[in-house]
Image: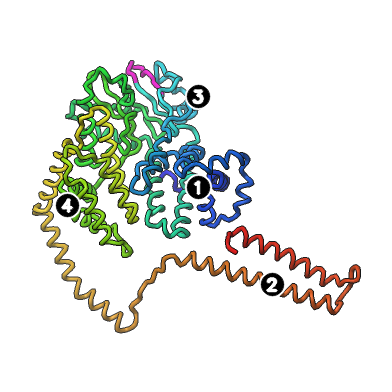
Amino acid sequence: MLFNFINPRHRIHKITRSSQILTRLVFYGFTELTEALGFRRRRWLSSRVTEIAKGRRIRRLPFGARLRLLFEELGPTFIKLGQLLSLRPDLLPEEITMELRKLQYAAAPLAFTKLEPILREEWGGQWRKKFRRIETKPLASASIAQVHRAVTLEGEEIVLKIQRPGIRDLIRSDLAILTDLAGLIERYLPRARIYRPAQLVDHFSKVLTLELDFCYEGRTMDLVRKNFQHDTGIHIPKVHWGLSSERVLVMEYIEGIRLSDETELAGLDTKKIADTGAKYVLAQVFEHGVYNADPHPANFIVRHDGVLVPLDFGMVGTLDEEMKQALVNMLLAFVNKDPNKLMRLFFTLELLDETARRSELSYDLSRLINYYHHIPVAHLSIARILQDLNAVIRRYRIALPVDLALTLKVVVTVESLGQRLDPEFDIIGVARPFVERVRVNRVKEWVDPEKIFDLLEDTAKLLRSLPYDIHELLKKARTGKLKLSLDLEDLDPRVREIDRSVNRLSFAVVISGLLVGSSFSMRQAIGPSLFGLPILGLAGFATAGILGIWFLIGILRSGRL
């Protein structure tokens, strides 16, 4: 992996960065989080913030707005995290995901002279001789990389995607900090465990680490180009591997119009473009299992001949056969008006724990699907369906698998993009052939002789080992060697509270002892005196007073009298 080792310099940077993150969490009004995680010196953190008045104004803003501003200030890693969270309406309410979608992909452009050291390290001191011309003005500028147009010695127009200097060190530290925070959240905030923060950060770390490896992005482009080599409506830019590396990706330059430039698309057949784009993404999801995880309009351009050109393969999602079938079953549950199919899906994926209110969940799913029962299939909106379904999922604290949740969001994005280009766009009609092919392939797997033989072989192995396993279990139970592992959830926070209470009690006993001892010393006039009063008694009273004030301040700051 890219970030397996953190040297001492990075450790120092991590400590400094952690302090900055804690300070900004307080500044944006997330003190409940910092205190729950054990960082209880709120006044010390607040004293680090210079813009007190601005902080008070910001803390009046809604949660989503404060979270977006926090991510923007903390930089590229957190902006990427916010963009990923904006794709998870199953975890966060719509008002928060809508706010996080405002996080900009663009970043302030960097002077080309700042990028030259990267090119020199990758290509050597004579790197300029590899090109006829390089435009120093960027075509695009993002938080991780910057894109410049160039011309090769052979006269071919290309683009250079150059990684920003120092971005790896910053992301390395931020990912380590996020991993620590996720662990603390799971330990001290039991209610947040259902959202699996450690798993979410682990997935985000893998996604971001791969996004920093431009060779991986180039290989993905080659794979997608191969998958769509016979599709005349799609063109994937060619990668120049002789010039590409982990930090520089060199691609074919394509002239065209971005789908985000709606005024420029007026002269093109937008209905055909919508159909082509939807089939491209759905084929990736249902047939190839590798897809652009964030197919927003800025990531597509259209050539003047109407051919669609996907760009930016940095964030890629994958979908195995089990998740494909889960996605199909979820869509079919609404199309076929079958709430039981959704319940069976949740059971199959083991998304319901022992505390789940299953009868209430079944009722809510039935009511939700019955709501759409009389709506014609052509008029069903995937976005509206999933918005209502996500509300139920959040209510019952169901955490969907990351791959499935991202894929659902991709389908919603495709529907939204298609309707922008064609008001009559029907995502379910376009998706129906892909869904049917997945179902047919599933049936073929069931009757595949090789799969049946493997199943019979595994069953035979299980039956052969079953008597021995039962004998061992009974033997251990009979001899007293059978061990049970007991995991008590929420025990750590309880232990911390008991420990804190014992410490306070001990502190109070010490203060009481000082007061009693000092009173005895004063009464007996033991030792030297000052102004006629024993110094030993005065010192005891002073110490007890200081400790008492300290004790009282600690109780008041904890918010619990």
Q: Position of residue 12 (x, y in %)?
A: 57, 46
Q: Choose the circle earlier in sequence order: 3 or 4.
A: 3
Q: In front: 434, or 516?
A: 516
Q: Which residues are magenta?
A: 148-157
Amino acid residing under circle 1: Ile
Q: In front: 489, or 474?
A: 489
Residue, disc 3: 111
Q: Secondary structure at mark 3?
A: loop
Q: Which mark is residue 510?
A: 2
Residue, disc 4: 338
Name the residue furthest bottom. Answer: 478
The CA span between labels 2 and 3 is 64 Å
Q: Position of residue 359 (x, y in %)?
A: 25, 62
The CA span between labels 2 and 4 is 68 Å
Q: Choose the circle earlier in sequence order: 1 or 2.
A: 1
The CA span between labels 3 and 1 is 29 Å
